[in-house]
Amino acid sequence: MIHSMTGYAARTLSDGNIHLHMELRSVNSRFLDLHFRVADDLAAFESSVREKLTRDLGRGKVECRLSFTLAEQGEGGELNPKKLAWLKAREAEIRAALPEALPLTVSDILRWPGAFTQEEGVDFTALEPAIARLTAETLDEFIASRAREGAKLALLIQGRGEQMRAIVAKVTPLIPAAQAAQSEKLRARLSDAVRDAGVNIDESRILQEVALFAARIDVDEELSRLATHLDELERILKTGGVVGKRLDFLMQEFNREANTLGSKAAVSEVTQAAMDLKLLIEQMREQVQNLE
């Protein structure tokens, strides 16, 4: 199975009167880059969550948010004066640095972890099993979302590969006749030039020049390598796993062969084929950048 580096998941789990909430989202990155936004009272669990994410994820810039609310907030608890004073001081500092920042609202304060004194009696150390379960459930959902996105990207890449194979199959039979025609034109031009110049040159010398020209415009090797690379593309997509870096390298190989094909092109069919191949390769490369 192939996974995208883009994904999202959010889960809420209740443990007594505490509602734990975890959110995971990710975008592309060359490596696994984890960022955490964890409520202060849950900071002790960050290392265990980080360990699980590191174990199960390959690449991507991943943001993890872990917070909690109390089921009885606003009904039976008393506002925490210390937390209110802390919020007031922090708001003043932020608005001094960023005057355009919006002020805290009543709803913001009511939802803020620690805003109620009843939270001070919570035994957060007892939440370890619940945090572990929440992490596992959220991570499963997150990986599933990346797998769904990865499957779509794999189909797109496979489709572009099939189009490339069709181009190679179409142009390959045309090459021998086209090269023979170009070589014959060159031989005729050289013979005419020698005759017009009144120079006595052995026919074998002309044939040597024609042979050198034929070698320079021979694209059989490039077409063969493209076919081989397309086989490798299919194999990688079928095998699955962490394929992003392998496919990125393969895109470079595809591009190299297409560029060489274009530089050697002696007939319009080959030139057009090289241009079409480069367009498909670029489209594939853009999708490959999203794969884990």
Image (spheres, rainbow, N blue to C red):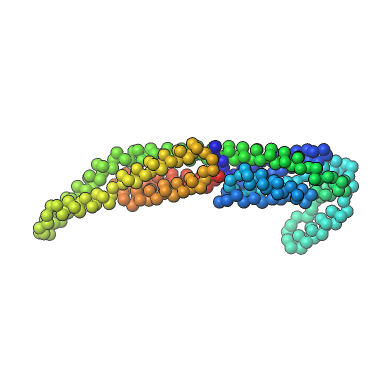
Can residue 238 be seen? Answer: yes
Q: Quadrant of residue 25?
A: top right
Q: Position of residue 264 (x, y in %)?
A: 31, 50
Which of 220/129 is in front? 129
Which of 280/247 is in front? 247
Q: Is 128 placed left or right of 159 in the picture?
A: right
Look at the image and tell me in which quarter the N terminus lies: top right
* Total residue callouts: 0
Q: In the image, is residue 148 above or below residue 95? A: above
Q: In the image, is residue 141 above or below residue 217? A: above
Which of 94/287 is in front? 287
Residue at screen point 46% across, 38% down: 235
Residue at screen point 24% across, 52% down: 213
Q: Position of residue 208 (x, y in %)?
A: 19, 52
Q: Position of residue 154 (x, y in %)?
A: 51, 39
Q: Is 175 placed left or right of 81 in the picture?
A: left
Can residue 164 be seen? Answer: no
Residue at screen point 84% across, 43% down: 73
Residue at screen point 28% across, 47% down: 218
Look at the image and tell me in which quarter the C terminus lies: top right
